[in-house]
Amino acid sequence: MEVVIVPDAVAGGELIAETIAALLSRKPGALLGVATGSTPLPVYEALAAKAASGAVDVSRARICQLDEYVGLPAGHPESYRSVVLREVVRPLGLGEDAFMGPDGAAGDIAAACAEYDRALAEAGGVDLQLLGIGTDGHIGFNEPCSSLASRTRIKTLTRQTRQDNARFFDSPEEVPHHVITQGIGTILEARHLVLLATGEAKAEAVALAVEGPLAAVVPASALQLHPHATVVVDEAAASGLKLADYFRDTYAAKPQWQGI
Ligand code: F6R
């Protein structure tokens, strides 16, 4: 696992957008897995700016969702389908045909989950999966004690996560209890995992995920199993890392052509 400490969220967004741009220049039809929430917004802004300036051609990129609320009415502005269309797909000038996600309004949720895992595999697998991290260490919506081998399935959000996400809804009670999330096993199949964490509220979860033992109680620690995982953190989110100086030295000495 590589840990890159950046000065702030904007620098993190720029670094990851550059990485995505480099991927798209090697593989124009790459499948990009995107997360929702506040953290990845600087990535999407930086990537859209690169696309608008002609620095990268995103016209053949494909986008896929990491997770989705269960039970929100179709078209609800906070369904992750709506969020990804609004924050990623449209700003990049892509159409809905370039986008795939699980159906949180399906009558048969178990079948929708299995169908999404199949669709990801049929699409050739995810080339780069962008991840955030919950204050409880979740990735996607794999809450603590999720199986490290899990596949896309329905999960129940913890009280903490519902509270953390209440800011997106008119009232805390409106946050759905259930979600569909790519499983940890599904996420680990992406070719490159890039986790972005910013702000002090994420420092403890980042330290446990990066330097703690591999444990289902800290789902993000599963990145330790992946051959190409990059954790990009700002100074505040890095504040709990014992090896911060080593991570800084390693990145400073890294040949630039390697990228992240
Ligand atoms: C959202 C997702 C979640 C978030 C995490 C952090 O698609 O998968 O794991 O990344 O809850 O959310 P923010 O970035 O809002 O702190």
Image: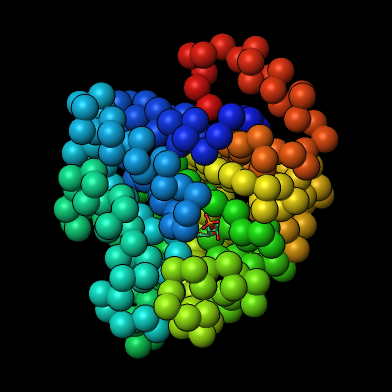
Q: Residue at x 45, y 65 (%)?
A: 67
Q: Is residue 136 left or right of residue 215?
A: left
> Residue 14: image x %, image y %?
43, 31
In this view, the residue farthest toward the bottom is 107
> Residue 54: image x %, image y %?
20, 26
> Residue 68: image x %, image y %?
42, 69
Q: Residue at x 52, y 80 (%)?
A: 172
Q: Is residue 243 above or below residue 125?
A: above
Q: Is residue 71 above or below residue 6?
A: below
Q: Is residue 100 left or right of residue 110?
A: left
Examine the image and state in which quarter residue 157 appears: bottom right
Examine the image and state in which quarter residue 151 appears: bottom right
Q: Is residue 226 above or below residue 11?
A: below
Q: Residue at x 31, y 53 (%)?
A: 87
Examine the image and state in which quarter residue 107 appears: bottom left
Q: Nearer the viewer, residue 33 or 175?
A: 175
